[in-house]
Image (tube, rainbow, N blue to C red):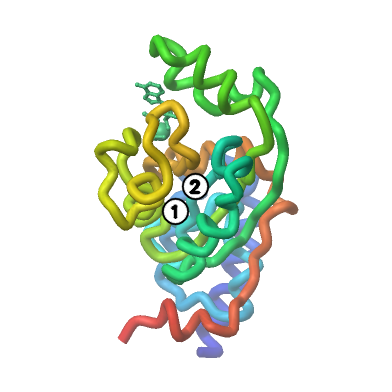
């Protein structure tokens, strides 16, 4: 335990120096952290976009303007919270058209892109970062298929919406998009590294 804490302390110092350096070096550090048990002392060392593959994996989730206007904020948050994921970032804002275009840049060639950008910037969005083991992939499963008519009952889209153009929620679809989207939407100081007293009941492996 003492050795693990000391190792994490050293790792934290190394992390500060690496911050401005190449992604490759950061990946090395992430792997080093994965070998340590993350305890109270380690919470402050989690990078803003989390550590994929660990209990500190993070994903970007956004309740779209239709979800907010339909009064589904609490319902949607509840599903992630009840699953055991930890909320580490949240804010409400109306994205500008430019920002919506940036968020959905990979879809800019699709015919529905102009409508999507208009919809996404038409009202407030609740932007969140959720943390926990498997947060990215499991988050996608909780959300359900893009087209709500194909989304399974029990998923958010399967239960709460019927139209692909009004499918109430966004979730990162992989490690790279999660990292990109968290950094696009949140400054590091807007994301809380915190230890939940329930964490051992939810995240401890045997
Ligand atoms: P995702 O939200 O499940 O990741 P993507 O393919 O990334 O799905 O598409 C982003 C968003 O674009 C969807 O959530 C939906 O709002 C919208 N969209 C996707 N396909 C269509 C379509 O065929 N018509 C209208 N809107 C679409
Ligand atoms: Mg997508």
Q: Which residue is mark 2?
A: 25
Q: Is residue 159 left or right of residue 69?
A: left
- Quadrant of ligand 1 in image: top left
Q: Mark 2 CB in 8 Å range of ligand 2? A: no
| Element on which disc 1 rests | helix
Q: Is residue 65 left or right of residue 78?
A: right
Q: Examine the rendered structure and indicate whether residue 50 appears above or below residue 32.
A: above
Q: Is residue 191 left or right of residue 34?
A: right
Q: Residue 96: which disc?
A: none
Q: Which residue is mark 1?
A: 28
Q: Is residue 33 visible?
A: no
Q: Examine the rendered structure and indicate whether residue 142 appears above or below residue 178.
A: below
| Circle 2/circle 1 CB separation < 8 Å | yes
Quarter of the image for residue 162 reads top left
Which x, y percent locates residue 8? 56, 73
Q: Examine the rendered structure and indicate whether residue 151 appears above or below residue 40.
A: above
Which x, y percent locates residue 140? 36, 48
Quarter of the image for residue 45 reads bottom right
Q: How many marks?
A: 2
Within-10-Å neighbours for mark 1: few <14, some 14–19, many 20+:
few
| Element on which disc 2 rests | helix
Q: Looking at the image, which residue is at 32% across and 33% down? A: 147
Which x, y percent locates residue 122? 65, 26
Q: Is residue 20 left or right of residue 164?
A: right
Q: Looking at the image, which residue is at 34% across and 81% down? A: 205
Q: Is residue 92 visible?
A: yes
Which x, y percent locates residue 38? 51, 75
Distance between mark 2 and mark 1 Cα atoms:
5 Å
Q: Looking at the image, which residue is at 43% across and 79% down? A: 202
């Amino acid at each position: 335990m003492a050795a693990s804490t000391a190792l994490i302390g050293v790792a934290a110092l190394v992390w500060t120096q690496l911050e401005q350096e190449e992604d490759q070096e950061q990946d090395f550090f992430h792997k080093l952290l994965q070998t340590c048990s993350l305890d109270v002392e380690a919470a402050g060392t989690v990078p803003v976009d989390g550590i994929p593959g660990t209990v500190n994996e993070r994903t970007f989730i956004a309740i779209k303007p239709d979800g907010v206007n339909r009064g589904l904020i609490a319902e949607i948050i509840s599903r992630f919270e009840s699953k055991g994921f930890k909320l580490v970032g949240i804010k409400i804002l109306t994205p500008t058209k430019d920002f919506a275009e940036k968020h959905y840049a990979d879809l800019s060639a699709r015919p529905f892109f102009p409508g999507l950008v208009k919809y996404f910037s038409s009202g407030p969005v609740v932007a969140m970062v959720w943390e926990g083991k498997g947060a990215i992939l499991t988050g996608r499963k909780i959300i359900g298929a893009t087209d709500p008519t194909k989304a399974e009952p029990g998923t958010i889209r399967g239960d709460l919406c019927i139209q692909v153009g009004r499918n109430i929620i966004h979730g990162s679809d992989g490690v790279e998009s999660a990292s990109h989207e968290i950094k696009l939407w949140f400054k590091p100081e807007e994301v809380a590294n915190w230890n939940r007293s329930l964490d051992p009941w939810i995240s401890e492996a045997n």
